[in-house]
Amino acid sequence: MQWKEIEISDKELFDNIFRKLNSQASEMVFSNMFMWRRSYNTRFTIASNMLLMVSNSRRYPPFAFCPLPVGEFRSEDFVSAVYTLKEYFDSRGWKLVFGRIEENMVGLFKEYLDLKLIIKKIDAISDYIYSTESLITLAGKKLSAKRNHINRFMREYGSFEYVELKKEHIDECKRIFDKWCEKNEASGAYDCEADSPECERWACYELLDNWDCFPELKGALIKVDGSFEAFTIGELLNEDTAVIHIEKGNTDIHGIYAVINREFVTRVFPNTKFINREEDMGKSGLRKAKMSYMPITKVYKYTICPVFK
């Protein structure tokens, strides 16, 4: 087997595999795996007709993603893949742990592995799921604060311009992100490591710098008083769910996030049922922001530790 880093040239392979999953998890698109590949320090290979991916990052112990079928799923291939990963982990002195396992994939391990499994839900990496309709209409008492933010924005600024993100806007997106980092670093709310793959800005730049390679990505910017002040990037996860990968804006402009969130979903994903706004990473500020939009459920993710006899 040849283990290799994820590259742009691997996009077709990953797209074909992910497309069949009908997953609601934010990781199960190539753009996510690509932008965070250095943070995860991901390596992958194909064995037993399965895609095997292993993370060996600086921040977390090594783990394997769930083996995914290259073609039709066969239980014997799944079992073989698990034992292949066991040999790989053993050869490096690591304990085999499966991480970021979507809830609907936990059953594969229970059904096909004749092993004791230690299964733990990890709330901090579980994705928030929202009703598309609720993000568009912001109807109801519970979302009145979001409507108020937009109303205040309109009172203070009068209008805005919605602009579809195209290649010529890449530098503006980077400028917005740079200013966001500068402000949040100064306040102590965010520790930006611009040259580190663990940094969200580094990951975002990977998408922006390779924009032409991701025709499925959709993006938008909001212009206020002639200046771009916010941008966002998302895509379809499956036929009825979209995922928002990036959303950054000038927090000095009250309501800018509420505006771009509503406008992007309204204009780009109105035919979906659900919007995945990803995880909160265990950060209280992010958790509060994501809860404020009233999620209808979460895509819970687990770690699974097989106990080999």
Image (cartoon, rainbow, N blue to C red):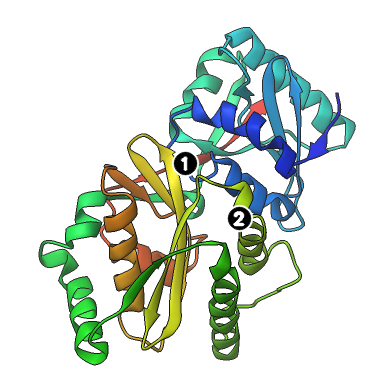
Going by the image, does 267 lie left or right of 230?
Answer: left
Q: What residue sits 76% from the left and 71% below the top?
A: 195
Q: Residue 181 at x, y = what percent?
A: 59, 80
Q: Mark 2 falls on what kind of element?
A: helix
**Residue on which disc 2 sits:** 211
Relative height, residue 135 to residue 146 (above, below): above
Q: Mark 1 falls on what kind of element?
A: loop
Q: Decide: marks 2, 1 in contact (CB < 8 A)? A: no
Seen as rendered, the residue at the extreme left is 140
Q: Is residue 59 visible?
A: yes
Q: What residue sits 63% from the left and 16% below the top?
A: 78
- The Cα atoms of the two marked residues, 2 and 1, are separated by 22 Å
Residue 25's disc is 1
Seen as rendered, the residue at the extreme front is 168
User: Which quadrant, please, contains the C terminus?
Assistant: top right
Q: Which residue type carries mark 1?
A: Ala
Q: Residue 155 at x, y = what percent?
A: 19, 88
Q: What residue sits 47% from the left and 22% below the top?
A: 107
Callout 1: 10 Å neighbours few (<14), some, many (20+)? Answer: many
Going by the image, does 89 lie left or right of 100?
Answer: right
Going by the image, does 85 lie left or right of 264?
Answer: right
Q: Residue 244 at x, y = what percent?
A: 44, 55
Nearest to viewer (mark 2 / mark 1): 2
Q: What residue sits 67% from the left and 61% below the top?
A: 209
Q: Earlier in the sequence, mark 2 or mark 1?
A: 1
Q: Is residue 284 visible?
A: no
Callout 2: 10 Å neighbours few (<14), some, many (20+)? Answer: some
- Residue 42 location, quadrant: top right
